[in-house]
Image (cartoon, rainbow, N blue to C red):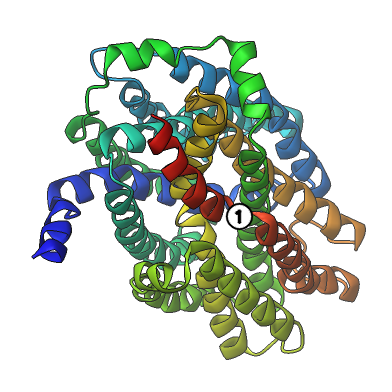
Amino acid sequence: MKSEGKKKANKVPTKLMLAWNSRSVSMAISVVLMMQVTYYSTEILGIGSAAVGALFMAAKLFDGVTDLIAGFIIDKTNTKLGKARPYELFIIPLWLLIIAFYSTPDIGTTGKMIYIFVTYVLINSVCATFLQSCETVFLGRAVKEDAKRAKILSIGGVIVMLFSAVSSILLPQLMANLGTQPGGWSKIALIYGVPMLLIGICRFLFVKEIPIDQESEDKNKVGFVEGLKLVAKNKYIFMFSLLVLLSFLLTNTLSIVGTYYFTYIFGNLGLMSVIGMLSLLSPFFFLLFPVAIRTIGSISFVKFGLAVALIAAVIRFFFPSNLMVIVVTTLVISVGSQTLTMMNHYFILQCIDYGEIKTGKRVEGTPTAIASFANKVGSGVASLLVGGFMALFGFISSASVQTDSAILSIRLLYSVIPAVILVIMLIVVHFFDVEKVLAKLRPQAEAES
């Protein structure tokens, strides 16, 4: 009877599950599309790969400032709609700016560089910053139980991955058919942008924050400097932010290089859709996540996933032209690395809980903003890494044939470099024991209160 009551208490309403993950789907699709910024800038706009890499990395410098500002603003927000919910509206300008980015006018190389830099900064440093910084805070205030949060994130991960997989199948075909036409990329952006904008706004419309006791709210109000000092005492948020940075460096590097890999090694960009088709299997692996986490613990499960992904990354280097090996290892690396990113908000909330127990103050926006900044730095470093590494090996933008050294750079970026990133992630995860520490601290804190 007790277990049945617990199951009912932890049941998540279907409406909440769908409404919450609507914006997650929209953001995931925006990431799929924005992963092609390097390819679009070099192959369509004709800007050099090194210049493009440096440009997007420079854009990330704004994120360090805007992420902290966004976190501070969210911590200070107290409206009728709630603390985090109002910032969900940034999904509207996000998609409008993405459409504008892929509609770059023909205004000369310098003009194009300025245009893509400004729109890219607005997309990432403003819109994506507020959307990512408010998400964990919103989840913590809309859903109070850890079990419900984990369920929303794990099942939501399946929903998001299914949409991402379909998007990944469709995009190479659109790129191959529309991408070479005048205005083709504007059409691609509109095909994604219009429906995703409408879907993305559903979380704002249908999910509400649970009212918080005002006295508790006032107690946790801190200034900008004090908030930074409190977060500085929380070692786990910095460890997790490093993991987020490495995770997005890995994902974005593979995504960016994948387009070049299929263009120059397989000689057929359309074959990338095979990767997308197989990725439809990924969500079904994610259904096992909650069971695995309950059985061996979330951190042990992350370690296992990263180790398997590492083995797959090494294997693919030795079979560069074997489509089956590339497809299978892509699936394994994707599923293995997603063991961390799918539970992103779950781990951040654990870091926030740890900070509250250690300092007596609950700071939500700033820790989330730091993790968000790490996300975007990882994405920016990926653009710089790919552009600079390929240029170093003699890659020439828009050339129909590349030198052997340029081909080698693409192979290394698709196998050896990801393997190195995964090794570093495994080392960091080994020391990230917040779950174990909280299991000891929570009972003590409850007894003292």
Q: Quick check: 299 above or below 200?
A: below
Q: Toward the viewer: 298 or 101?
A: 298
Q: Quadrant of residue 418?
A: bottom right
Residue at image position (50%, 35%) is 352
Residue at image position (71%, 86%) is 315
- Answer left or right for 20 relative to 112: left
Q: Which residue is tagged 1?
A: 433
Disc 1 residue type (three-letter): Asp
Residue 435, horizontal then vertical, whole percent: 52, 53
Residue 353, horizontal then vertical, whole percent: 47, 37
Element at label 1:
loop
Q: Quick check: 249 above or below 67?
A: below
Residue at image position (54%, 63%) is 299
How packed mark 1 is, by other alpha carbons closer than 10 Å (few <14, some 14-19, many 20 or more), is few
Q: Toward the viewer: 22 or 45?
A: 22
**In this orientation, does residue 183 appear?**
no
Q: Quick check: 298 above or below 187?
A: below
Please state, as top left, top right, bottom left or bottom right, where the N terminus lies in the image.
Answer: bottom left
Q: Quick check: 354 above or below 305?
A: above
